[in-house]
Amino acid sequence: MYTDREILETIDMVSHQHLDVRTITMGISLFDCITDDRRRLCDKIYDKIMRKAENIVRIGNDISNEIGVPIVNKRISVTPISLITAASGGHMEVIRTLDRAADEIGIDFLGGYSALVHKAMTPYEREFINSIPEALSTTKKICSSVNVATSKAGINMDAVRMMGRIVKECARLTKDQDSLACAKFVVFANAVEDNPFMTGAFLGPGEDDAVINVGVSGPGVVKRALENVKGDLTEVAECIKQTAFKITRVGQLVAAEASRRLGVSSGIVDLSLAPTPVVGDSVAHILEEIGLECVGACGTTATLALLNDAVKKGGIMASGHVGGLSGAFIPVSEDAGMINGAEKGALTLEKLEAMTAVCSVGLDMIAIPGDTHEDVISALIADEIAIGVVNTKTTAVRVIPVYGKSEGEYAEFGGLLGRAPIMHISKYSPSAFIARGGRIPAPLHSNKN
């Protein structure tokens, strides 16, 4: 039960501090749709998605209206499509089927046009990955991801090499939209099976037939709470922990109610602090409230580590099933404070990479010059993936080489994706390294059996 005080606190967090449930995401398994008949496959996928998720938008809105907390996005994730289409091919027919279902249901995004190639690739998976630019440039709501490494398998550098070319092709095909397709594509190390956040959401093979995963948010709530903390960093951590508990309680309520009404399993609550371009809803501003003049200053990595740890500790106490990514996101274009830090030159690509060692995910929504060579992009991805593999954590790259634009200009994406200053990236060539291919072996500590 919720006390009167908790209810009043929640009303204040919603009204003045930008508290929201960022997404309810229904994961749907497509394994029972597999067939070697392409047309039959598409029909089965469409029918199952419509049957399971046809009411997700209405029910999400109903819950939001009843409890008074905004639910910003309603989404779907599916089994990685490369696994579903391997018998029949026809991945482009499937992508059109998925886009049609997403449009008819009225969801914001559908994730799972994905491949898991962390150790090696089959010929079909290569073909599938090569289809990603066309898939993302010809659809509006489909998101794609590729897992190229795990701490157990090492890094598939043949796949990493492909990623630079795929990103560049996504940029070219949507050059009239500031290369928007790149914002719907992410490259992972140690991808998780229950992530509710796009663009990296897919439903892993170990999941139920259908499940509700919820992503909460609330950077503004944490920022406001810290404004009253004048003590040392132990008190700061305790305040963040208590605030994360309150935020997660709201997410847990929504998860339980949505799964009950939709008649599917209740999965996880993802604790991630997900910012938006709205002023007052910024992870960067939390770090500055802790004591930095500007995000990117020396001390940024340490303050982010404190924040991430405290969020996890507080959230775990509020929900029996915490999962997804759970921590603090640092997407440049989606965070007003990050944009400001990049504009001032305080926040650089190198500093962002260091920050990813202690936060959720990785180099996210970063715009770079459109003429950046594909091998440089592959090497940037390799650097970030190595951080994930060595530290046994999820890391990812969502980078946008904005076609036709240069350092100092801006990319405009709109909505939650925001706008991004195009950042400097080293153009010294890593091509000889990338051309070697093969696999970077797993670290020694992966041998735990």
Image (cartoon, grey):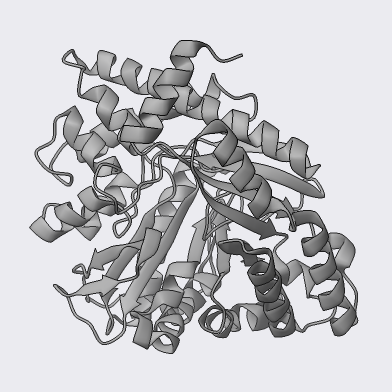
Front-lying residue, 370 or 44: 44
- Please report the residue visible at 46 percent of the width from the left and 22 percent of the height from the top: 246
Does residue 308 sit above or below 167 in this rendering?
above
Front-lying residue, 276 or 348: 276
Where residue 240 appears, as percent x and y from the top left, is 34, 23
- Please report the residue visible at 42 percent of the width from the left and 27 percent of the height from the top: 11
Left or right, 126 with reference to 352: right
Where residue 111 appears, as percent x and y from the top left, is 61, 62
Left or right, 155 with reference to 411: right
Where residue 41 appears, as percent x and y from the top left, is 85, 76
Question: Residue 120 is drawn in which quadrant?
Answer: bottom right
- Please report the residue visible at 13 percent of the width from the left and 72 percent of the height from the top: 408
Question: Residue 114 is drawn in which quadrant?
Answer: bottom right
Left or right, 55 with reference to 297: right
Does residue 291 sit above or below 241 in this rendering?
below
Where residue 169 appears, as percent x and y from the top left, is 45, 85
Front-lying residue, 258 or 400: 258
- Please report the residue visible at 23 percent of the width from the left and 56 percent of the height from the top: 350
The answer to whether residue 117 is seen in the rendering is no
Image quadrant containing the C terminus: top right
Left or right, 339 with reference to 179: left
Image quadrant containing the N terminus: top right
